[in-house]
Image: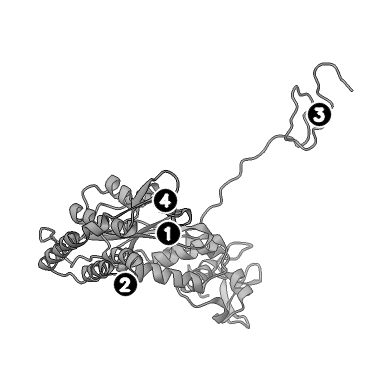
Amino acid sequence: MKKLSPRARTCPICHRPCRKKGTTRAGTQRWYCTECRYSFTAPRADQQHLAQFREFIDYVTDTRPRRHLTTSIRTWDRDHALCWTTKPIWQPTGEIHDQIFIDGTYIAHGWCVLTAATTQGIIDYQLCDRESKASYQALLARIPAPLVVVTDGAQGALAAIRKEWPTSRLQRCQVHIQRNIRRVTTSRPKIVQHKALYRLGLDLTRITTSEQAIAWQKKLAAFHNLYDPWLAERTFKADTPPGVVPAFAKRNKAWWYTHHNTRSIVRSLDTHVKDGVLFTYLDPNLETTNKLRSTINPLEGGINAPLKAYLHAHRGLTEHHMLRAMDYYLYSRSLNTQPITDFATNIEQPTPLHANNTRPGPAEIDTTINTSAPWEDGLTIRTGWIRN
């Protein structure tokens, strides 16, 4: 008699090895127990779940909607319901990078996504409600301090960098500075002062050498020599009709600078030059393996914009499904090397509910009036004389 293989399926009744007995109409292997004379199939639930998880990953890491799937939407939802309870494990590598870009973007359901990335991929991200100092600190605390960090100048990001990465050099995004200038001057300035300031903004993003940076700072000094008297012009509330007074000067200001917005932009440029955060990427003393960037475009254009397009393609998801899909989407573009299919068994356990041992209904013996209970009428527990 042929000896059965040790890998043969065991009978669910007597737990003895069985032999093969053809296949079903669907092509599934059928097994037969010679002792119990019982025929059965032995599906591999783990392999089925892994195959469904791969289909789930293909869906949540791509922008193709479910209506383009081969099966119906309801069948797909039923087969992949367990996959929504899994989640990836973010494990920062601990590598010290030359340059890190940090920025936040807002998505549906009131969430804000703070992302830290390099030109190669995402390091980590943090969910929050707004770009606050505490939110950025929670993100930066998990990542070693880089040599240079690039930010758009959000106050929460700057405060968190000073707290968590005090040794890192700061580079302000030049594109955001240029946008701030264009917000005041517009792309078609009318007056000569705005034309000169707009030209400074255009030249800022074209600087590639230290000599060009020095020449740009000389142009800024020349702007001050020419237009400082114009920037110092004042407007007095007593000489201004009430409907023309700006909002920031309505309460307790007797005068304000006439060109308030232009003056604020110019003073911010002076502050950036004084702090040395405009041309950090040109510092020859920084020894890096790759060329440093002066903007956060690799993060905004390479991660945030595709993330917005991805969420738009999958619009209509519930809040939980949206966050879980985004978690896998960002992980697929991260620097982590662990295969994404390893998380098929990383199922998120539900939070246990505390048992309530109190009996429903009013207390049998009590000394106070429970005003929050709907059954308490306040007539059975009283003190003092009853008055009509």
Q: CA distance from mark 4 to mark 1?
A: 31 Å
Residue kind at label 4, given as amino acid type? Phe
Could you tell me if the residues under marks 2 and 1 are in contact, i.e. CB atoms within 8 Å?
A: no
Circle 4: element type: helix
Q: Mark 2 vs mark 4: which is more N-terminal?
A: 2
Could you tell me if the residues under marks 4 and 3 are in contact, i.e. CB atoms within 8 Å?
A: no
Quadrant housing residue 335: bottom left
Could you tell me if the residues under marks 1 and 3 are in contact, i.e. CB atoms within 8 Å?
A: no
- Where's the C terminus, which quadrant? top right
Q: Which residue is mark 2?
A: 190
Q: CA distance from mark 2 to mark 3?
A: 76 Å
Above/below status of 95 relative to 386: below
State the residue at coordinates (30%, 53%): 143
State the residue at coordinates (59%, 73%): 76
Circle 1: element type: strand
Q: Which residue is mark 4?
A: 248
Q: Mark 4 vs mark 1: which is more N-terminal?
A: 1
Q: Tell me where residue 332 appears, x and y as whole percent.
A: 39, 68
Q: Mark 1 vs mark 3: which is more N-terminal?
A: 1
- Of tags 4 and 1, which is closer to the observer? 4
Q: Which residue is mark 1?
A: 113
